[in-house]
Amino acid sequence: MTILGTRSITNVIRPIGLVVAIVALLLPWFVDFPGLSDVGSRMFGIFLMAIVLWVTEAIPLHATAALIVLLEILLISDKAFGSESIPDAPSYSTFFAAFASPVIMLFLGGFFLAETAAKFDFDKYLAKVMLRPFGTSPKLIMLGLMMITAGLSMFMSNTATTATLMAVVIPVVAGLPAGDRLKTGLALSIPIAANIGGMGTPVGTPPNAIAVGSLADAGYNVSFVQWMIVSVPIMLVLLFGAWWLLGRFYRGSSDRIDIDIEATFDRSRPAMVFYVTFAVTVLLWLTEPIHGISSSIVGFLPVVVLLATRVFTTRDMQHIQWNVLWLVAGGIALGIGVGTSGLDDWLVSRINWDVIDPAMIIVVLALIAVALSTVISNSAATNLLMPIGLSLAISGGLGLSPILVAFFIAIAASSAMALPVSTPPNAIAYSTGAVTTKNMASIGIAVGAASLVLFFLIAPTIWSILGVS
């Protein structure tokens, strides 16, 4: 489909989506939902509106997140219209607090580290240094690129990581002979590795942060290290499996490729401050069980240090992905609203879950997450499914583990990597011209399916061993 055709479709969908969203929001005022309280009905309208707006992108995703918070304050909080008639209405500050949730601080710290790394070209030079041991063999260089990309994506934005590694690879791709399949293999290896690597830590990708934040709000704490213990082993298996697939289907015609691996790290005082801050932050994240300092508090450390030392300036602040933070905050606020309004219990009671195997419920939620995340933002998909999934686990009486439910929704959302629109890393790779939608779909579906199968088979056992399932 041409860009012009895509824009034409978008121009039609967005106005329709806006109208449908308004109708969905107003629906509770005209339709009675048996068993659902007045405040629950209002929240149901907000929830339906969020679904429509996030799927159609009638307004920007982060704008929808902000709108959710405003509507919750105006319709179901203690400052709502007619709030005197709302029993035990939650404080309006509860919804505003979503923007300062601990998980937002955790993600903000990750963004500060990623932005400062790019400022000093630390990520690019580090990647070049780490590529040196892989020599000139195309197969080994592809493995090196994927390992470095996945490793950086665990602690930095996978979008920024993909852009950085693509800058290293594009000159190589351009120098390969026309028709060499290695071009496609190299261009695909980076987004695939970034998507896989993002699964490894709570700061790796927004769905992970949404899961950890939603669990914390429900009283279930998952540490940085616990998430890694479960995810990283499976992530490594996926990474090597993806490398094997890419090497098999996109074998190049050359026996040797050369990549510029010359790296000169910035040795200025601000750069040195950043290097130390980065190392200390990651070290504290990895040793959380020893010192007991929450990963969210640790995540706020680089924010304070880099600002106080003027390493991170006002101009740098403008480059932070505030839209992602707002999107995550909107999802947290949506979960709070669904829980405090009683909408969660009402939604759960609509289906006789007793006749469905609990494991199958998790599978269905995961498959829905994959389907939604393939065509819309994985953050938006996670935001929509997380309140429902946790409601089922906590109040459904089905014996479901809230941690497993939240974990699988997040992992499933990250496993959707079949189309250029599925993730920003995919879009970056597609923009190089070396990758077609067919190329991406064939590898993305295979890796995504393998991801779900491996996590379903292995993750529950690891969570159980950790004693937090």
Image (cartoon, rainbow, N blue to C red):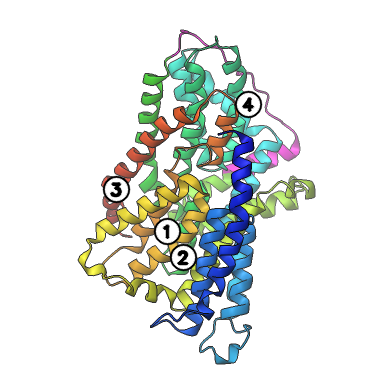
Q: Earlier in the sequence, mark 2 or mark 1?
A: 2
- Residue displayed at 60% across by 38% down: 5
Q: Which residues are magenta?
A: 252-279
Q: Earlier in the sequence, mark 3 or mark 1?
A: 1
Circle 4 SS class: helix
Q: Disc 4 or disc 2, which is closer to the eye?
A: 4
Percent x, y of residue 364: 32, 55
Q: Is residue 179 above or below residue 364?
A: above
- Tag of residue 456: 3
Q: Residues within 10 Å of mark 1 (few under 14, many from 20)?
A: some
Label 2 and label 1: CA atoms lie apart by: 8 Å
Circle 2 SS class: helix
Which image quadrant: the N terminus? top right
Q: Amino acid at mark 2?
A: Ala
Label 2 and label 3: CA atoms lie apart by: 23 Å
Percent x, y of residue 323: 64, 53
Q: Does the stretch in magenta take in 44?
A: no
Q: Amino acid at mark 3?
A: Phe
Label 4 and label 2: CA atoms lie apart by: 38 Å
User: Picture quarter containing residue 269?
Assistant: top right
Along the line of sight, which residue is nearer the eye, 283 or 13? 13
Q: Which residue is mark 1?
A: 222
Q: Which residue is mark 4?
A: 167
Q: Is residue 32 left or right of residue 452?
A: right
Q: Which residue is mark 2?
A: 216
Q: Amino acid at mark 4?
A: Ala
Q: Residues within 10 Å of mark 3 (few under 14, many from 20)?
A: some
Asked if the residue under mark 3 is in contact with the one under mark 2, i.e. CB atoms within 8 Å, the reply is: no
Asked if the residue under mark 1 is in contact with the one under mark 2, i.e. CB atoms within 8 Å, the reply is: yes
Q: Disc 3 or disc 1, which is closer to the eye?
A: 3
